[in-house]
Amino acid sequence: MRRSGPWLLALCALAIAFRTLGLGLVQASRDLYAHDFSDTFYLARRWGALELPLWLPNARLGQPFLALLYTQTFYAPRVVTALLFGHVLGPNVMHALHAAWAFAGLFLFGRRLGLTRWAAFIGAAPFSLSPFYVEFAQNLSFASTAAWSGWVFLGAEGVRRRAGPESAAWLSLALGGAFHGGAPEIFLWEVLGVALLLAKPRRRGAAWRWGAAALALGVGLGAIVALPAAELAREYTRPGEAPAGLTEWSMSWTQLLAIVVPDADVPRDGPYWGGVDQRFLFSVFIGALAGLFAVGSVTRRRTWPLLGLLLACVVLSLGRNFAVSELLLQLPPFRFFRYPAKYAVGALCALSLLSGVGFQRLAALARRRRAAASRVVLGTVALFAALAIAGRFGRSGMQSGTGWALVAVVFGAGALLGLRRCAAPVVAGLVVVELLFTPHHQWPRLPLADLLRPSPIAEVLRSEGAGRVSIRVDMDDRDPEASGPWDADDAGDLITLHSRERLSGLRFVEEGLRATSGYGFRDPWRLSEAFRHREGAFALSGVTHFVRNTDDTPRFFGPEPRLTGFEDVWVWRWKEAFPRGWVVQRARVGTDAEAFAALDQPLQALRHEVVIDRGAALDGAPCESSVETTERAPEELHQFVDVCADGYLVLADAWYPGWRVEVDGVRAEPVRAFGFLRAVRVGAGRHEVRWTYRPSSLAVGGAITGACALLVAGLVVSGRRRGAKAAVSPGRG
């Protein structure tokens, strides 16, 4: 029981923290319903048919799918839970499993640092079982990558202690798993933690060499998604444009206090975007007891890497609220990522581990009746008492939270100093009680069945033979907190509950609709620029219907209103939409600016002339051609055309590198039409045109990943052979 006690307690805590899953209630916060459910639906459908999901045809005139890191295309936990539990319950189950995975990794790392089982539990639980992590499901890929932190640090410690091929192989596997989790910012601070751990003095040279090799292999294992993701970032960002919102969602100084005081930052100050307080992490609370015990670790030399990680992540997370942070965030690699609050996750991880180290040190001092333990513990309790007094003048959350925090540290201090030899399991139990039962702000849990109800709006659209649809429902970033109706009883967000019915976010993907809109990674600049020229872009994109509940209504003549069954959602039908493919006999070569400006022409002019980025100009007389378009797979599209005269076949799908085209089996050169669509030159007569999506970034990345996987396997075999020889050698003597 002594050996299994921490694991059983963690299992019980997990069961309580995620108990609503057994009741059919799930988390479905903004990003979950806006894109994670739909991405998971598509992922499961394609993998269930044994197809590699490279391209998503439903959003933004088509967009890469695998290249979006947060879709976790090759991430086994996402794929397996989606196939077993469905696209809404599956992500919630995966998140619960990641909480267990995070606990196991941090617990084993604590044991590697020399902590007792209960001290390792106290070091792992505040991160993995806390309100912070339980509510972290709203950022699924970030929670997934963060769950690997303990395993990454465990691998780094293995390299530090016994640098060699086998330890490097295990570190590279942990890094590869973290990379496929889909959050490069989290991966970045995990790598920083590895570097700090390897900077400790034991065999530093060998450790650095094998650690660098492990890092290279770990990144190489992720190259199959990393290279397509880099290509996506390049294509979706306007040339010369700096990343937008670099310091949005910065941690405030008050939110640092909220790490150890529940709800100290409630209500959060300022607007949703650009406010004083960040809104990325719904909760940052990992326990007052974590703060109490972490103080005891400060003077321990073996904790210096964790202290360094804590300090670095705190500084980075403050963003616009700290001048040093603002300066650092302008430097690579940090300047490539938005939202400094993401780095706070590293601070929470480091503080959690420090609490385990600090508890063990303080407990040892208390058993020897050292006055130092009493001074540290009682001094920290006095600090929390002062916070409780000062909190009476703070935010409403701080007024109540400081009282709860003080109660927790008083009980924790009493158990540590009073029980001494049997303090560890009692304190571990107090940690669990604090994390699970301290009142804190949380996302509503909503009925699974309601989130799966099909959309009556989609039924209307299908009955009218909708082509592409322009959808703007409930996702109003200008005022996210007032983008639709809220439950008057505060029992849940009605927008979220009815998100599929209302086609909010990307949930139109689950209905099989194709739309011009998208959500998630930044909007592609070419589409954003094109749709500034509203009528022309909508016509060329084949938009037959508009769905709205914001003020972004069609602002041109022609669309006819339809009823939807929702009093605040409207549908318009438009008859001027172009077909998905058509042929023009006039073409001129122009810059992007000229191509987008051409969208302001009358629709009749757009039907007969195209602006292309390269190729031969044409000045033929307009004539009638026929085009039949069939899609055999999202990555393969066939067009059968009967062309009256030489021209360009325009396809109303998004321009993106990696799309190849053949005309009658002969490779042809695709050109960019109107700055955002695809086209190809065709001669007079009947032709079969075949479009296929085969990005070279995937081929190169896949080759690198395959080679790295073989190298990792070779390192494991080599390490095992060296170990076997070392074990045999003494016997020969």
Image (cartoon, grey):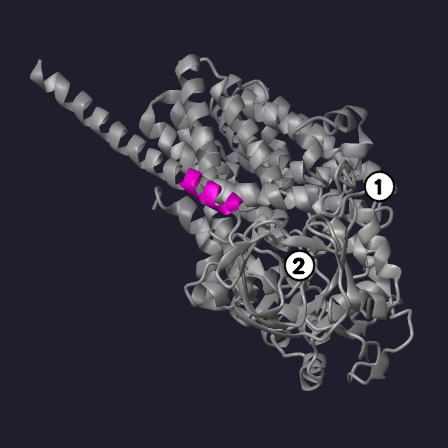
Q: Identify the residue shown where x is 39% and y is 36%.
A: 708
Compared with residue 237, is residue 685 higher up or lower down, i.e. above or below?
Answer: below
> Is 702 colored magenta in this rendering?
yes
Q: Residue 678 location in percent, x, y?
A: 66, 58
Q: Residue furthest left?
A: 732
Q: Identify the residue shown where x is 79% and y is 46%.
A: 591
Query: Are the residues at dot 1 and dot 2 in contact (C-beta closer than 8 Å)?
Result: no
Which numbered dot is residue 139?
none
Q: Residue 704 location in percent, x, y?
A: 43, 38
Using the numbered discs, state the Cα–Cα distance from disc 1 to disc 2 in whole angstroms: 47 Å
Q: Nearer the viewer, residue 683 or 160?
A: 683
When asked about the image quadrant of residue 299, the answer is top right
Q: Would you say residue 472 is visible in this rendering?
A: no
What SS does tag 1 mark? Answer: loop
The residue beneath circle 1 is 276
Amino acid at dot 1: Val
Quadrant occupied by the C terminus: top left
When asked about the image quadrant of residue 373, the answer is top right
Q: Nearer the viewer, residue 564 or 32?
A: 564
The part of the chain drawn in magenta is 696-705
Q: Characterize the local packing of mark 1: few (<14), some (14-19) or many (20 or more) Cα atoms within 10 angstroms.
A: many
